[in-house]
Image (cartoon, rainbow, N blue to C red):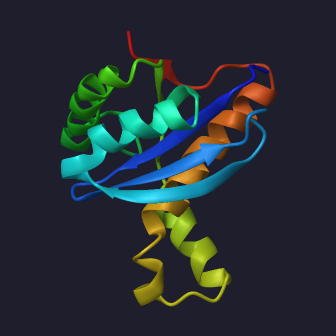
Amino acid sequence: MRVGRRLGLDYGSVRLGVAISDPHGVLATPYETLQLEVAITELIRIVEVEEIIEIVLGLPKHLNGSEGASADLVRAFAEDLRTCGVPIRFVDERSTTVSAAAQLRQSGRTSKTSKLIIDQATAVIILQGALDAEKSGRLPGEVLT
């Protein structure tokens, strides 16, 4: 397992959910939700302050595994994200928002209060999945080259 903090990102049309790992890459926790118009600037700052070694970005796919317009937007965002200066890894984010919403409901949150943190919760699921895959000996997803 590589040592260093990672960021998990859930890209949305308006907001970006951000999660962060511990330095040992074991546990993902919510970090914050950013408005897209300031996301790149804020992520550059976060990468520097938190000493991030990698960004894990959720890539939306259809149930059959193909990519659509949403994936194109995420890939374009990733190109802009290169300015952060750390490797970017795409991971399949199918069903992560549904899982995050279910977990928030089970924790007693209403849909109104969940709206404020659903993007962070989804980013946690994306990042934790990548961390778990790496712990099992395989690097998750696809690296932006």
> Compared with residue 126, is residue 84 higher up or lower down, i.e. above or below?
above
Does residue 76 appear to the left or right of 109 in the view shown? Answer: left
Quarter of the image where the C terminus is located: top left
Along the line of sight, the residue nearer the viewer: 18 or 42: 42
- Residue 34 at x, y percent in the picture: 34, 56
Q: Which residue appears at 52% of the width and 42% of the height?
A: 8
Q: Which residue appears at 30% of the width and 34% of the height?
A: 67
| Residue at the front extreme, as displayed | 49
- Residue 80 at x, y percent in the picture: 24, 27
**Snapshot quadrant of residue 23:** top right
Does residue 13 appear to the left or right of 46 in the view shown? Answer: left
> Compared with residue 120, is residue 94 higher up or lower down, i.e. above or below?
above
Q: Is residue 61 visible?
A: no
User: Number of callouts in the render?
Assistant: 0
- Residue 33 at x, y percent in the picture: 40, 60
Q: Which residue appears at 41% of the width and 88% of the height?
A: 112
Q: Which residue appears at 79% of the width and 21% of the height?
A: 1
Q: Is residue 17 visible?
A: yes
